[in-house]
């Protein structure tokens, strides 16, 4: 088995670029956080090798949605759907 097969992963999520979010922040609904094994409100992560970021689990974030800074969304190629994978403090965004 490959190492990535052990990572916790969400199902496909809508990706929403938000101008007002800081560049190093992502928001997801707590249900998606549970899929990743995340249970508290805020985590410091290394986002896809782009450096330190924070992920917030917020009830105000629509379910099955990733809210991300618009500039970072553009750098990722403006995906409309993506999966999140998490392992040992590293968060990966995989386009679907």
Image (cartoon, rainbow, N blue to C red):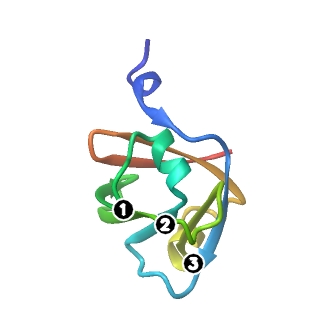
Label 1 secondary element: loop
Q: Single out the mark in the foreground, 3 or 2.
A: 2
Quadrant including the N terminus: top left
Q: Are marks 2 and 1 in contact (CB under 8 Å)?
A: yes
Q: Are marks 3 and 2 in contact (CB under 8 Å)?
A: no
The image shows residue 43 at horizontal and vertical percentages of: 30, 58
Q: Label 1 to label 3, Cα distance in Å?
A: 22 Å
Label 3 secondary element: helix
> What is the number of the mark on residue 58?
2
Q: Earlier in the sequence, mark 1 or mark 3?
A: 1
Q: Label 2 to label 1, Cα distance in Å?
A: 7 Å
Tag 3 residue: 70
Q: Nearer the viewer, residue 33 or 93?
A: 33
The image shows residue 96 at horizontal and vertical percentages of: 68, 45
Q: Nearer the viewer, residue 35 or 45?
A: 35
Q: Are marks 1 and 3 in contact (CB under 8 Å)?
A: no
Please report the residue visible at 50 percent of the width from the left and 40 percent of the height from the top: 35
Label 2 secondary element: loop
Please report the residue visible at 33 percent of the width from the left and 46 percent of the height from the top: 90
> What is the number of the mark on residue 24?
none
Crowd band around label 3 with a 10 angstrom C-alpha radius: few (<14), some (14–19), many (20+): some
Q: Label 3 to label 2, Cα distance in Å?
A: 18 Å
Please report the residue visible at 53 percent of the width from the left and 78 percent of the height from the top: 71
Q: Earlier in the sequence, mark 2 or mark 1?
A: 1
The image shows residue 82 at horizontal and vertical percentages of: 63, 50
Tag 1 residue: 41
Q: Nearer the viewer, residue 77 or 16?
A: 16
Please report the residue visible at 62 percent of the width from the left and 63 percent of the height from the top: 77
């Amino acid at each position: 088995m490959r190492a990535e097969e052990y990572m916790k992963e969400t199902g496909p999520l809508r990706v929403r670029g938000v101008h007002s979010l800081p560049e190093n922040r992502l928001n997801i609904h707590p249900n998606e956080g549970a899929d990743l094994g995340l249970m508290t409100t805020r985590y410091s992560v290394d986002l896809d090798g782009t450096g330190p970021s924070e992920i917030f689990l917020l009830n105000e974030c629509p379910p099955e949605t990733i809210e991300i800074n618009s500039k970072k969304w553009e750098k990722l190629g403006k995906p409309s759907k993506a999966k999140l994978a998490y392992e040992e403090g590293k968060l990966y965004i995989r386009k679907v």
